Amino acid sequence: DTRLKLELAANAASLDAATATAGEREATVAREERDLELVRKAAAQGGTNQRELSDAESALAVARAQVAQARAAVVVIEQQRALLASRLADLDIRAPFDGVVTVRHTEMGAWVSEGGPVADLIDTGTLEAWFEVPQELLAAANELAAGSRRGPAGPPPIAIEAGTDLVVVGRAGIGLD
């Protein structure tokens, strides 16, 4: 990830420069607006000619176009930064579940082919257990499972599946009396 981090640092410097350029261009627009207003006042009093007024209007239009161009450059650099950040995040290997590493197939810095094994993980967040429940106790087990919902801070979820394709989802931590 060293190269990507260096590219991100260079991108941050480019973004700072582009933002400063955009600010400079906006200040130029403000100055050109003031100049145009002064030329218009002078023209109203007969103190200037049409060419000076036209030049001031053109200078303001050019300054506004430069602001738009500078802002677009900032957007492009921000998009490049997002792409670099995404590429850097892609280097982190994350499991889609909580677990522990049981076997490592590669070492830090080694090249891994696409789809190749990196590590073996065991899921510690899911436990599957099968219990035989007599048919006459199924209704009570379903009631206990349905009544065991305790919210996100409570025990992990459980599901009771019957041979009749009935599924009741509840939370662990229930007991049968």
Image (cartoon, rainbow, N blue to C red):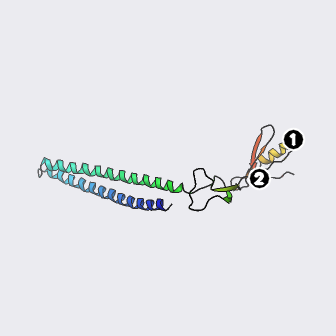
Q: In front here: 157 or 38? A: 157
Instruction: Provide the residue designation for mark 1.
Output: 135
Q: Amino acid type of disc 1?
A: Gln
Q: Residues within 10 Å of mark 2 (few under 14, many from 20)?
A: some
The location of residue 39, given as percent across then percent down, is 17, 52
Work out whether mark 1 precedes mark 2 in sequence or the reverse, and give the earlier one. Answer: 1
Question: In the displayed structure, would residue 107 be above or below residue 126?
Answer: below
Closer to the camera, 174 or 13?
Answer: 13
Please tell me in which quadrant of the rendered image residue 118 appears.
Answer: bottom right
Residue 172 - label = 2
- Left or right: 80 in relation to 32: right
Residue 11: horizontal and vertical position, in percent? 41, 59
Query: Secondary structure beneath disc 2?
Result: loop
Furthest-top residue in view?
A: 164
122 relative to 86 in the view: left or right = right
Mark 1 Cα shell of 10 Å, populated few (<14), some (14-19), many (≥20): few
Which is nearer the eye, 111 or 59?
111
- Residue at the image position 26 percent from the left and 52 percent from the top: 63
Q: Amino acid at mark 2?
A: Ala
Residue at 68 percent across and 59 percent down: it is 103
Q: Nearer the viewer, residue 140 or 112?
A: 112
> SS class of the residue under badge 1?
helix
Marks 1/2: CA distance?
Answer: 21 Å
